[in-house]
Image: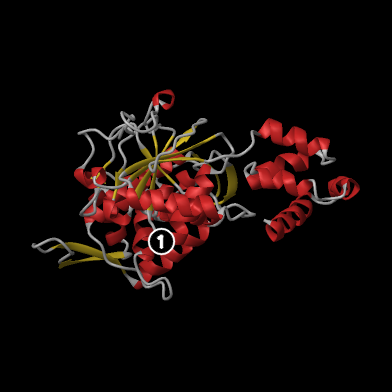
Amino acid sequence: MMRAFTSSDRVLLFLLMKGDRTDNAGGTTDQDEIAACCGIGRTHVPRALKPLITDGFVEGTQGRTPGRARRVKLYSLTAKGITAALALRDRVTDITVEWTDDHGRFERENCVDALRKINDRLGASSMNRIPISLFLALGKNSVGWNELLELSSSLLSMRAGVVSLPEGWRPLAPPDPPQFVIDRTMEMEGLLSMLEHNGVSIIVGDRGAGKRTLVQLVTERSGLRVLWLSRDGEKEYHIEPSGYDIMVMIGVQMIDLSSVLIGEGRTDLKDPRDKNWPEELLAMPLLGILEGDLEAERDDIMSLGGLKERDFMEKAVEMGMMEGLAREYFKATHGIPSALSYLGEIDPSALTGLGTLDMEAALMSLMLGLRSRY
């Protein structure tokens, strides 16, 4: 269990991981970093270090760290300490943990694999990766995504150039890349142009229309680094503004959609960032992603069309497709009309026959055919 690792154990593991991963020689650090990366109160660090120094696992020397003018006490592993730390690292792989990712999906796996996936998702959002020593400090074998964000944010707060998000906001990991991608060339070009020419803009569409996927594809292919935000945070989160080019807000009402006017007297989009936002974040271009139905001839609003899921599935089933496959086909195509048009080109018996195949094989067959025609 994670509770079986003491504060001194976590210090050994952290010092080991501070070094070159290829030679397991360990690294050097000070008491402030030990406190932050091992989940130990600053005043309790000497207590955690004392038995390690007494047993000959850790040694201290005077030296300087980046950003500090004065010399401080630095700590590193001895040869004996490296052996002890390697034994602890082997124990970590025997721990099974349960965790929930940023999309609410539940995972259960060994501690090392879990932390690797967690850090991959944090890294994709330019959030700080969590060292195993801090992960173990949670002391429990079940953890939610908000707790993981808090750990990552606590590490970021130590770095220069970091700012705090206003209360109620939390960073999100980018959407998962879709298994099958339909290039919506016109929409992609339109969204990129909108992002380049507007400080504040929105993309609107029904649920399942592919708004997040489109934003992810466009920003990834254009090299834009995105700060994804959701207004459901309970804690204060820290971020490094220099890691991002554009901010994307999910589900924030930036305009009364019923009051959008075309031409003279049109209603401007509302920037939800107020004076409580740091200047570095206020200067960042903003894209809002909203659910709704809006037709407006404006260069700062994109309405992403597509059929509603219920209507799409009814038509697909009428054409001979099995209901389960129709649902997955809708998710993969985001309900674009051409996806239904393509079904009309397939012989009904062949379409019905797809229901006898493995779901992934049937979906891949459909998507390959759709991409070859549209």
Quadrant where the C terminus sits is: bottom right
SS for callout 1: loop
Q: List the residue tagged with mark 1.
A: 223
Judged left or right of residue 99, residue 30 is left
Q: Residue furthest right?
A: 349
Q: Position of residue 138 (x, y in %)?
A: 42, 43
Quarter occupied by residue 233: top left
In the foreground, 14 or 366:
366
| Location of residue 180 with respect to 172 vertically, above or below | below
Quarter occupied by residue 231: top left
Q: Residue furthest front?
A: 264
Q: Position of residue 15 (x, y in %)?
A: 34, 62
In the foreground, 268 or 179:
268
> Which residue is painted at 63% across and 54% down in the image?
179
> Which residue is painted at 37% across and 38% down in the image?
170
| Location of residue 71 with respect to 299 vertically, above or below | below
Q: Position of residue 34 (x, y in %)?
A: 28, 54
